[in-house]
Amino acid sequence: MKSPSNKTFDPHQPYKVEFTVNSTTERKVTLLPQLLRCTSCQGRSMTAKPVAGYGPKTAQVALVGRNPGAQDVNNKRPFSGPAGDILNQMLRRAGLDFTECYLTNVVKCKTQHDMEPSIQSRTNCYKKWLLPELFELPNLKLIVLLGNTALRAFEKEASITLVHGQSWKWQTRPEVTLFASFSPSQNIGPYVTQLWADTAKLETLVKQLREAK
């Protein structure tokens, strides 16, 4: 994980997300044709197209959210709306560059009125799409779980309010560390302080992973 360029960081100021991944390093989503034809659950019929993961093949960090929003569907990339701007600020504070991370969601389709995806959708997408795409990242070292849906895809009984800011080894791939935090879309009200406190802990974890190389 390389260090990002030094720029003034202010979590209260917007930072526009810019996707500048070089075409030679951009990950080719080999599952995309099958994903576009997926009819495994009701969620597929509620959106024009599912949104596949996006990022470099060599990514050591993956960011996992709940499911795409309207702007993500339009742009065909996860975290391309306002939540992505906040996420970019979080990553820079933690010493990461947005373009070196792999971006994805547990559920690949937008839900009506941005409601919580069904249990069927979460189960199907995790097994059929999320696990295979994460295993296509051979250098993966860290997965950041953003929000309760992402957390429970990996730890079914966990609650984000209890484990946010904590890290542990992923039993499926013991060389990979999981880190839980609130969704960047929750950067409001009582979650603001907790979200940025988690980011400081993520910064410490990233430094430890770099030093362990």
Image (cartoon, rainbow, N blue to C red):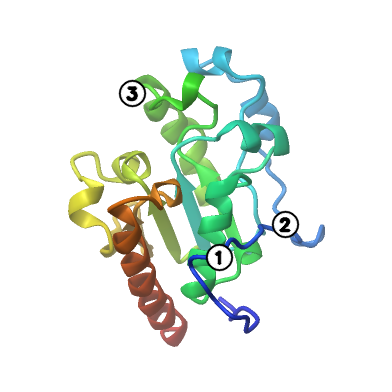
Q: Quadrant of residue 154?
A: top left
Q: Nearer the viewer, mark 3 or mark 1?
A: 1
Q: Which mark is residue 13?
A: 1
Q: Quadrant of residue 100?
A: bottom right
Residue 151, image x, y percentages: 32, 46
SS class, disc 3: helix
Mark 2 vs mark 1, CA separation in Å:
19 Å
Q: 191 and 31: which one is in front? A: 191
Residue count near mark 2 (Cα–Cα under 10 Å), binned few <14, some 14–19, many ≥20 = few
75 sits left or right of 176 in the view: right
Contact (CB < 8 A) between labels 3 and 1? no
Residue at the bottom extreme of this rendering: 211
Q: Evaluate whether residue 71 shows in this view.
A: yes
Residue 82, image x, y percentages: 57, 47
Mark 3 vs mark 1, CA separation in Å:
36 Å
Residue at the right extreme of this rendering: 23
Q: Which residue is mark 2?
A: 19
Q: Which mark is residue 119?
A: 3
Residue beneath the point at 76% across and 61% down: 20
Q: Evaluate whether residue 136 shows in this view.
A: no
Mark before the other along the chain sequence, 3 or 1: 1
Q: 4 and 133: which one is in front? A: 4
Q: Could you tell me the amino acid type at mark 3?
A: Ile
Mark 2 vs mark 3, CA separation in Å:
32 Å
Residue 61, image x, y percentages: 51, 63
Residue 25, image x, y percentages: 75, 61
The N terminus lies in quadrant: bottom right
Residue beneath the point at 64% across and 48% down: 54
Mark before the other along the chain sequence, 2 or 3: 2
Is 69 situated above or below 135? above
Residue count near mark 1 (Cα–Cα under 10 Å), binned few <14, some 14–19, many ≥20 = few
